[in-house]
Image (spheres, coloured by chain):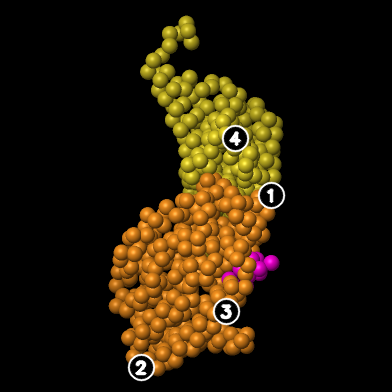
Chain colours: A orange, B yellow
Amino acid sequence: MITRRLLLISAAAISFASTALAEGKLKVVATFSILGDLVAQVGGDRVEVTTLVGPDGDAHVYQPSPADAQGVADAAVIVANGLGFEGWMDRLVEASGTAATVVIASNTVTPIAFAEAVEEAGHDDHADEHADEHAEEHADEAHDHDHAHDHGAQDPHAWQNVTNVAIYVENIAAGLTAADPEGAATYKANATAYLAELSVLDADIRAAVAALPADRRTIVTSHDSFGYFAAAYGLTFVSPQGVSTEAEASAMDVAALITQIRDAGISAVFVENIADPRLLEQVASETGAKIGGTLFSDALSGPDGPASTYLAMMRNNLTQLTAALGS
Amino acid sequence: MSWLVDPFTDFVFMQRALLGCLAISLGATPVGVFLMLRRMSLTGDAMAHAILPGAAVGYLVAGLNLGAMTIGGVVAGLIVAVLTGAVARFTALREDASLAAFYLISLALGVLLVSLKGSNVDLMHVLFGTVLALDNAALILLCAITTVTLATLALIFRPLVLECADPRFLASVSRWSGPVHFIFLALVVLNLVAGFQALGTLMAVGIMILPAATARFWATSISGMLIVAAVSASIASVFGLLMSYHAGLPSGPAIILSAGCLYLLSLGFGRVGSLFTRAFPRPHLDA
């Protein structure tokens, strides 16, 4: 198992290294690092992938640079997440005047509204009133038209559910095939192999969560990116901050969170790779909750980090969660 | 009453935020009053921007590390202060113009350095610190800077007042004119660095200057202004934190806006030279 993963990772690394040098490959721009990894997995050495928001970057507050616009202009295929995740994407595509095919990776994924996962998990703590209101407010819009550009209504972080990523991979394979029909067989073979990896991952996550005690499935983290993970695998994530990292937490939010942790007896607080860790350390020291390791949500880590690929990222998160909750 | 007290008794982070804000209120407002009296109110703003590259270098070296960012900020602020003074002394350019030049260079350098790290959200944490996340080290730093500031101000109080009133006279009777100016600028830098741990570089200037401007409408003596400024900053801190707690507002802007409301009220109804007293002057005998 581990050997196979290592082989896959090194294969991906080697293909990265060789594609960067080679000429005449299909130029693909992915909007952020996780999509970049998926495209590299499907495209193999037939494509040259560039990512706009690199490892550890935050796509919510990204500002395109002229070099990015140039890369977009030269690209044959652009892969975006959709669901309102890249609010800047339409403008960038238009401004660069690119002729590239735009693949929306989340196409046909069933979107969920923000904080819906909290409701589904049957979490009725009163400290969540704020989030629930928000969900109800937008729930109608979200269900009415599922391809709407309702920024803020739908949760764009669909890749946190491994089943959705299988859809991503199929969309990416279809998009690459349309742009480069000669590579159809390669893309299909790569996608099939990767889908097998994904289903193993999905089963592993389900098994690990099932092994947790029922009363130890609530986690606090500083970013609301785990709605799909929560809905798919039956965990509850609560957060001191709103869904966007642009929001500054108020004393009310922090107090509500501390009250919630005390009342619900939550024992693990996770620091994410992109939100302010100082705030969480404060909450943890006040409640006596344990600070877990780093969860990766919106961005991969650098090549030497614990989440250099999507698979590594999900397995890292799973290890961190089970370590903190299982004890 | 419970509206006022409960947030602070129930939550340790509110107590820490309050202590941090009160420390800044005591330390930064006297500096703000002297800035205002010396017609250097905008200098505070300029220096706040000048601190950014130092904090950024500290951040690049050690991450969100209090010590590294503080040392970096102080060093960058002092370099800009010294360069500004030197340029004003040795070239034809006036001090305000050379300060503007250096702080803009410094600000651009700071934004560039933070962005180089690749993750642009961190810049927001540097620009908008959070008073809700003060740990022990940050609190000790804030209180230490306040102590140093108050002690230093007590030592240089007389020459500093003279420097405000008549700098040429001070220069003619004492060798203290130059040193006092630089010591004072160093205090400005120190307090801005303290303030940006809690409020961020942009908001730190607010807690320094707004209470000073408020105090101008209530007191005629310097000591009176110092007291009014410290008290109004403390009121603004408490009220801002309460608003942040009860109304869910972000804490830094809530505190600065509270100070802003006090300023606007004083502007309208203060005892000394406000719009009200100008509109309805009292007879001389009563005054």
* Mark 1 and mark 4: Cα distance apart in space: 25 Å
What's the distance in space between the residues labelled 4 and 3, CA to CA?
Answer: 49 Å
Regarding mark 3 in the picture, which secondary structure is present there? helix
What numbered label is drawn on residue A204?
Answer: 3
Question: Is the residue marked by circle 1 packed among few (<14), some (14-19), or many (20+) residues within 10 Å?
Answer: few
Q: Quadrant of the C terminus of chain A?
A: bottom right
The answer to the question of whether label 2 and label 3 lie on touching residues, with beta carbons closer than 8 A, is no
Up/down of B259 relative to B127, above or below: above
Task: Tell us which disc is closer to us: 3 or 1.
Answer: 3
- Rendered image quadrant of residue B85: top right
Please identify the dominant SS of the magenta region: helix
Asked if marks 2 and 3 fall on the same chain, the answer is yes
Q: Helix, strand or loop at disc 2?
A: helix
Q: Is residue A217 visible?
A: yes
Residue for badge 1: B137
Residue drawn 44% across and 80% down?
A: A166
Question: Of the residues shown, which amino acid type is indicated by label 1?
Answer: Ala
Q: Chain of mark 2?
A: A
Q: Is residue B79 visible?
A: no
Q: At numbered mark 1, what does the secondary structure look like: helix, strand or loop?
A: helix
**Callout 1–callout 4 Cβ contact below 8 Å:** no
Residue A285 at what x, y percent from top left?
67, 52
> Alpha-carbon distance for marks 2 and 4?
72 Å
In the image, are marks 1 and 4 on the same chain?
A: yes
Q: Chain of mark 3?
A: A
Splitting the image into 4 quarters, where does residue B146 fall?
top right
Give the crowd class for mark 3: few <14, some 14-19, many >=20 residues within 10 Å. Answer: some
In the image, what residue type sits under mark 3? Asp
What range is drawn magenta here? Answer: A316-327
Q: As shown in the figure, which amino acid type bears the numbered disc 4?
A: Val
Question: Residue at image x 36%, y 75%?
Answer: A108
Mark 4–mark 3 contact, CB under 8 Å? no
